[in-house]
Amino acid sequence: MEREEIEKKVRNFLIEDLEIDEEKIAPDAKLKEDLGIDSLDFVDIVVIVERNFGFKIKPEEMQGVDTYSKFCDYIESKIS
């Protein structure tokens, strides 16, 4: 899966499932501070990522993943 496709899927579920404003989604947007993703949203993200990308997120692997770009990097590293 190409990086562009990963970013498109992530962007779509942030907008559709978590109702985040599209204008807020930028490569350097902070997941918590800028996009407003909280711990309850994270539970949804785990399910959505598993459904869309076929792997389970391990919380310990998410340390340091604090921006939209780093989140896409994480997904890319898991599926390639």
Image: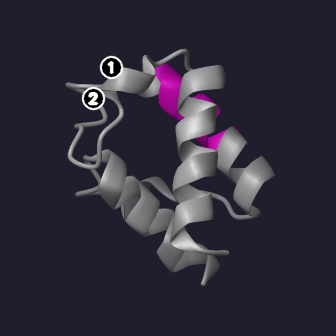
Q: Amino acid at mark 2?
A: Lys
- Residue 1 in sight: yes
Give the residue drawn at x 33%, y 55%.
Answer: 69
Q: Where 74 sits versus 10, above or below?
A: below
- Give coordinates of residue 70: x percent, y percent: 32, 59
Viewport quadrant of the C terminus? bottom right
Q: Is residue 20 left or right of residue 68?
A: right
Q: Where 11 sits versus 76, above or below?
A: above
Label drawn at residue 10 = none
The secondary structure type at the circle numbered 1 is: loop
The residue singled out by tag 1 in the image is 36
- Magenta range is 40-47
Give the distance between the C-alpha atoms of the residues marked 1 and 2, in whole angstroms. Answer: 5 Å
Q: Quadrant of residue 57?
A: bottom right
- Give coordinates of residue 27: x percent, y percent: 28, 49
The residue singled out by tag 2 in the image is 32
Q: Is residue 48 left or right of residue 64?
A: right
Q: Amino acid at mark 1?
A: Gly
Q: Is residue 10 left or right of residue 53?
A: left
The majority secondary structure of the magenta stretch comes to helix
